[in-house]
Every structure is written in C-alpha cells, then in structure tokens.
Amino acid sequence: MIHSRRALRALPILLAAAACARGSSESQSTADTTTRTAAVTQTGAPNSLTADEQSAGWKLLFDGTSTDAWRGYKEQGMPAGWKVEDGELTKDAPTGDIVTKDQYGDFELQWDWKLAKGGNAGVFYRATEEYDHVYWSGPEYQLLDDANHPDGKNRLTSAGAAYALYPPPAGVVRPAGEWNSSRILVRGNHVEHWLNGQKVVDYELGSADWQGKVKASKFVDWPNYGKASRGYIAIQGDHDGKLELRNIKIREL
C-alpha cells in the first residue's frame, strides 16, 4: 500500500512531464516545418519571382525562355552566339556584348552565374553607347574563375571586383563549374558589390578616392567613364569560355 500511495502521488508529475515533452516535440516539429517552408519560399523556382518580390517591385530581366529584355551593344537584335538553353542564358565562345533595352539609375540587381575553367566575363552598369565599347563608360562587376585565370592573381581584377579600381577579399568566389550569386546595389553615388551573400566592395562614384583610382587606371582615356547617372545594364560576351546565367532580376530604387 505504501508503494501504491507513492505511485498515486507521483502520477500527476509524470503526466505533466509527458505533456511538456509532447509540447516541446510539437513545437520543434512546427519550427522545423516553418523553417523548411521559409527555405522553399526564399528559394523559389529558377527564373521566377515570389509574391513578396513582385510586391517589392522586382522584375525579371531573364525568364528562362526568351531574351526579350536584351539586345546587342549598338544593335537592335541579339548577337549570334548568345542562346537560351535549359533555362539559362549562355554563350560558349567570344561574341558581342549585350545590354538591357531599358536604362536604370538607382537599382538593385541580382543574378546567378557560373563560368567554365579559366572563364572571364563581367556585368556593367549605368553604361552608355557613346563609345566603341561598353566598358569605356560603365563600371564593371568582374566575373572570373579566380583559380585558373591570370586576372585572379590580382585582387583588383578578381571575381567581385569593381574592375581595376576596388578589390574584393579572396576566397569568396566558388570554383569553376559551380553557381555563384551576385548583387549590385546602386543608389545615388553609392555602389555595393555582393558575392555569395557577402559584401565584397563598396565605393562612392565621383568621390576624390574614385577619381584618383580612375586617373591611375586605363579608364582615364575615356572622360565620361562612370559619370552617367542612368544607363544600361550590360553583360560582357567577348571573352573566351562558357558563361551561364540565370535568375537575373532587378528593381528600381
């Protein structure tokens, strides 16, 4: 009888502990489900916009099926060599540079990219068509296989750099054949380069520091380099190697 009374006294405690354990387990399960759902929502389908992105003003520059948002530099159509393949905008060999049909001033641009071994390319912004080449007017976000291209030996010309002007840290870019995610933020004179979730470059257009770096570079030969307050987004196509792009999206600020 003594043991039975002890068991009866202990029963409410055991029941409470069991309920607590169930509650904790259910809470953890709910948290895990929420996390998984959030991850799916954030990732989304390639070359598409989530409802939140649409509400925030994002628009696709590439939908995985057409090049309607693009044309060749100083051309009406797309240069031969660019193609849409398996939901990616690609080129396999040197071809003409391409620009957006629309121009942008303050904006946020995001895209995914990968290069073949030794690959080299770039994305330009606020570019004009006043010169023979797009890189004579628009600052460049460098795309590079750092490990296998000679430019990777110099931080000023490595992946994520504001080409020849501002260097990114080493070790952020992924190897050739793997996808990288990039972002450019331009607001007024302030510019940021992001690579794989990390801010790698920031600078002020027109600042004394900027002007000094431009004067010490090859861009000194083109007086309007980096001076446009509004211009085209452009993608470099004239280098060797395969370039693949997807999830290209932009929002104006």
Image (tube, grey):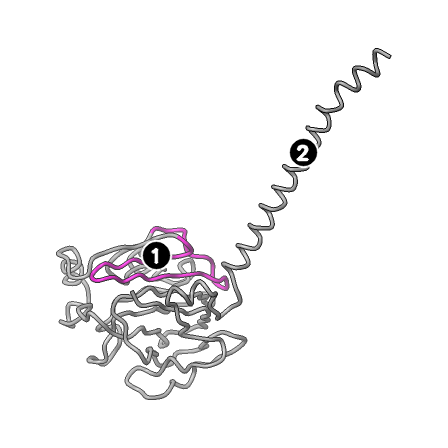
Q: Quadrant of residue 5?
A: top right
Q: Which residues are magenta?
A: 169-197
- Give the residue furthest to the top: 2
Check disc 1 and give the amino acid type: Lys
The image shows residue 215 at horizontal and vertical percentages of 14, 63
Query: Mark 1: which secondary structure?
Result: helix
Q: Nearer the viewer, residue 21 or 219?
A: 21
**Is the residue marked by circle 1 packed among few (<14), some (14-19), or many (20+) residues within 10 Å?**
few
Position of the C terminus, as image quadrant, is: bottom left
Q: Nearer the viewer, residue 11 or 138?
A: 11
Q: Is residue 112 magenta?
A: no
Query: Which label was assigned to residue 21?
Result: 2
- Give the residue furthest to the bottom: 76
Q: Is residue 32 left or right of residue 91?
A: right
Q: Is residue 31 left or right of residue 68?
A: right
Residue at the spot of label 1: 153
Q: Nearer the viewer, residue 22 or 8?
A: 8
Check disc 2 and give the amino acid type: Ala
Q: Quadrant of residue 53?
A: bottom left
Position of the N terminus, as image quadrant, is: top right
